[in-house]
Image: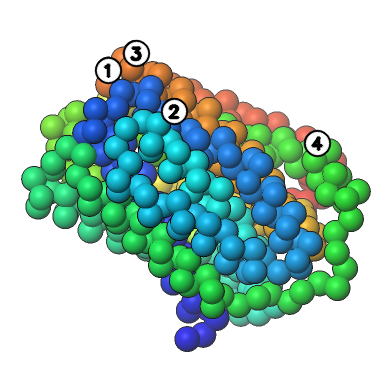
């Protein structure tokens, strides 16, 4: 099997686990009797650990000079904890398993992105987006298949098929990581001073912060979309269909981004992504019909596809190759750690207050407008130079 094929399969399996987890794990926990606050709290554990876990693994990776080696260790650690997920059925047990899994899992995205970006950079005919889109395909495949399976099983509360599907995908990742290609190893190791400069680069941190606000606004969707479908009286299979439409739009955006990149600055790409997301959440807060819920998923091409293409391209060009894993991990820590953790906790508390998901999407729309304004107000100077470089 070629290195490109292995990378594609890894992305397929990893984001397949996300497709099994995000839409269905909150309804699964609700079926076990968890409150909204308990759902938000246990799922906040992973995002909170993103900061120390991702940065620790990234530092180790940059010292190794080989993110593929670090990725093998991280996936093995995540699997060792995930195998207990099907038997954890009370809040403290689920929280403990998710804590253990996060010690490895929260480093996977920055590490595999580091491997892929460097591997693709050495092969100009291969684009990062063309490999990453297989993650989107894995997400939709698992979301659709699991939704249909849950419906055929009668939409049972707390169906153990949900954690079993997650564990199966995590196991595939651990196996595939053993054969991923190692990118060219730089003879020059990063210095501590260079790492600290990343943490003090104000334009870069402001860029990360704007992305974190956007990701916090996505939390009601990531955490509670499955519950929204059920509270509207719609079947779990519709969750899978809606996810399929969303990921289809995401794939189209990832395929189109290499052509858009020379014409669209980072600031404008992010502002467009966040503004379109605000429209999406505002409309979703009022949608009741199945057709409307599904069709609004087409805006996911802006919410994630355009956002991710611009964010990865900007980070890759703003950070030296020898600090690639650290730069990707810093992005993941701020956006998927701080932003996601805050969004999850507020979503859980908001669900307990409103007793429904719809109003949370209205608040998410307002937060997206703030993120869009922040993107347009990113400082000039060093940031403008990066935009010119991206063009």
Q: Earlier in the sequence, mark 3 or mark 4?
A: 4
Determine the residue positioned at 64% across, 69% down: 69
**Given this view, does label 3 or label 4 mark the residue nearer the observer?**
3
The residue labelled by disc 4 is 202
Mark 1 closeness class: few <14, some 14–19, many ≥20 residues within 10 Å: few
Quadrant containing the C terminus in the rendered view: bottom right
The residue labelled by disc 2 is 41
Mark 3 closeness class: few <14, some 14–19, many ≥20 residues within 10 Å: few
- Counting from the top left corner in percent of width and height, residue 155 is at 13, 43
The Cα atoms of the two marked residues, 2 and 1, are separated by: 17 Å
Q: Earlier in the sequence, mark 3 or mark 2?
A: 2
**Does the CB distance between marks 2 and 4 fall below 8 Å?**
no
- Counting from the top left corner in percent of width and height, residue 67 is at 67, 65
Judging depth in this view, the residue of 180 and 282 nearest the camera is 180
Residue 263 seen from this side: no
The Cα atoms of the two marked residues, 3 and 2, are separated by: 15 Å
Task: Describe the element under mark 2 as helix, strand or loop.
Answer: helix
Task: Describe the element under mark 1 as helix, strand or loop.
Answer: loop
- Counting from the top left corner in percent of width and height, residue 98 is at 45, 42
Q: Earlier in the sequence, mark 2 or mark 4?
A: 2
The Cα atoms of the two marked residues, 3 and 4, are separated by: 37 Å
The residue labelled by disc 3 is 353
Q: Is residue 343 above or below residue 194?
A: above
Give the number of callouts: 4
Q: Earlier in the sequence, mark 2 or mark 1?
A: 2
Determine the residue positioned at 73% across, 58% down: 60
The residue labelled by disc 1 is 355
The Cα atoms of the two marked residues, 2 and 4, are separated by: 31 Å
Q: Is residue 336 above or below residue 123?
A: above
């Amino acid at each position: 099997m070629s290195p490109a094929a292995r990378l594609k399969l890894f992305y397929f399996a990893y984001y397949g686990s996300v497709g099994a987890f995000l839409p269905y794990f909150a309804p699964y926990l609700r079926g076990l009797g968890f409150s909204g606050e308990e759902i938000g709290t246990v799922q906040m554990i992973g995002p909170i650990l993103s900061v120390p876990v991702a940065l620790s693994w990234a530092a180790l990776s940059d010292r190794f000079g080989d993110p593929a080696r670090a990725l093998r260790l991280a996936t093995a650690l995540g699997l060792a904890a995930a195998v207990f997920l099907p038997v954890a059925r009370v809040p403290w047990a689920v929280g403990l398993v998710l804590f253990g899994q996060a010690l490895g899992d929260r480093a996977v995205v920055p590490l595999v992105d580091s491997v892929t970006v460097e591997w693709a950079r050495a092969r100009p005919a291969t684009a990062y987006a063309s490999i990453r889109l297989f993650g989107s395909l894995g997400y939709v495949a698992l979301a659709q298949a699991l939704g249909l399976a849950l419906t055929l099983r009668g939409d049972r509360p707390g169906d153990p098929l949900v954690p079993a599907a997650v564990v199966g995908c995590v196991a595939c990742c651990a196996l595939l990581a053993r054969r991923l290609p190692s990118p060219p190893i730089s003879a020059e190791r990063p210095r501590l001073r260079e790492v600290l400069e990343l943490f003090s680069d104000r334009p870069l941190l402001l860029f990360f912060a704007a992305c974190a606000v956007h990701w916090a606004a996505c939390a009601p969707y990531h955490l509670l979309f499955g519950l929204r479908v059920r509270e509207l009286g719609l079947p779990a299979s519709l969750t899978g269909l809606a996810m399929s439409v969303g990921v289809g739009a995401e794939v189209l955006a990832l395929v189109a981004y290499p052509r858009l990149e020379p014409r669209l600055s980072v600031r404008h790409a992010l502002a467009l992504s966040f503004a379109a997301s605000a429209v999406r959440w505002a409309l979703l807060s009022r949608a009741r019909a199945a057709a409307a819920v599904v069709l609004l998923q087409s805006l996911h091409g802006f919410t994630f596809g355009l956002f991710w293409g611009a964010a990865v391209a900007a980070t890759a060009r703003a950070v030296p190759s020898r600090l690639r894993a650290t730069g990707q991990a810093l992005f993941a820590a701020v956006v998927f750690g701080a932003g996601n953790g805050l969004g999850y906790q507020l979503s859980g508390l908001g669900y307990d207050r409103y007793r429904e998901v719809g109003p949370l999407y209205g608040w998410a729309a307002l937060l997206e407008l703030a993120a869009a304004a922040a993107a347009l107000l990113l400082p000039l100077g060093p940031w403008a130079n990066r935009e010119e470089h991206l063009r």
